[in-house]
Amino acid sequence: GENVEQHPSTLSVQEGDSAVIKCTYSDSASNYFPWYKQELGKRPQLIIDIRSNVGEKKDQRIAVTLNKTAKHFSLHITETQPEDSAVYFCAASAPGTYKYIFGTGTRLKVLA
Amino acid sequence: NAGVTQTPKFQVLKTGQSMTLQCAQDMNHNSMYWYRQDPGMGLRLIYYSASEGTTDKGEVPNGYNVSRLNKREFSLRLESAAPSQTSVYFCASSDRETDYEQYFGPGTRLTVT
């Protein structure tokens, strides 16, 4: 079945620097790759997603890139702010399965 | 719209007790999901229901049962709780026909002593 690996497990950056989180997936049929942000004690919330027919997607300070050949995708956060501190999860989903397989999460700390 | 709602928010059980976690969504979504979240383990799929009338096992189904009561409601039952089931449980829903986005409920924090 699908397996999603996520790195790093923790990441500390200075405010204003960029942060990059990487995920690899195993099922080449996967075509949907969301990223979720989870603040302490809260539910995961979608921050950006990408489909397999697109190589890159941006939303203000957040971007996601997808390399289908290598089966990996990355989250890029620029000009980080303290409120970006949270746990970030990647996931992958293949058509026809209805399942979403999640990575183990990255705890991002933005140091003021 | 309330989105995805879950009850209860918190629960403490003794080993061997049973309980049902309730989930409802008002977005007319076809698919519903139950996940558990343990520290450092991410979100692991327990059971899912692709559409009303169907349920399937996820990665960690042992010790759980589910019921898709109707299109809105999807419940998770622990028949005989064990300390290993101490976790935060999230329900989610999506409409795979139109949009792959999953929407999560606020979670239930369950402790089994």
Image: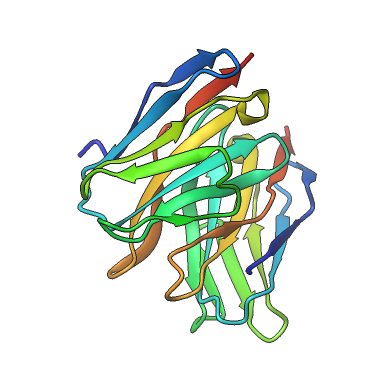
Which residue: 29% across, 60% down?
B51
Front one among A56 and A10: A10
Q: Up-down: is B112 above or below A56?
A: above
Residue B39 sits in which quadrant?
top right
Residue A26 sits in which quadrant?
bottom right
Which residue: 59% across, 46% down?
B43
Which residue: 78% across, 45% down?
A11
Position of residue A9 in the picture relative to residue A43 (left or right): right
Which residue: 55% across, 47% down?
B61
Position of residue A59 in the picture relative to residue A81 (left or right): left
Q: Quadrant of the N terminus of chain B?
A: top left
Q: Quadrant of the C terminus of chain B?
A: top right
Horizontal and vertical percent for residue A46?
46, 51
Q: Can you see residue A15?
A: no
Front one among B45 and A41: B45
Q: Can you see residue B56?
A: yes
Horizontal and vertical percent for residue B26?
21, 43
Residue B24 sits in which quadrant?
top left
Q: Up-down: is A77 above or below A1?
A: above
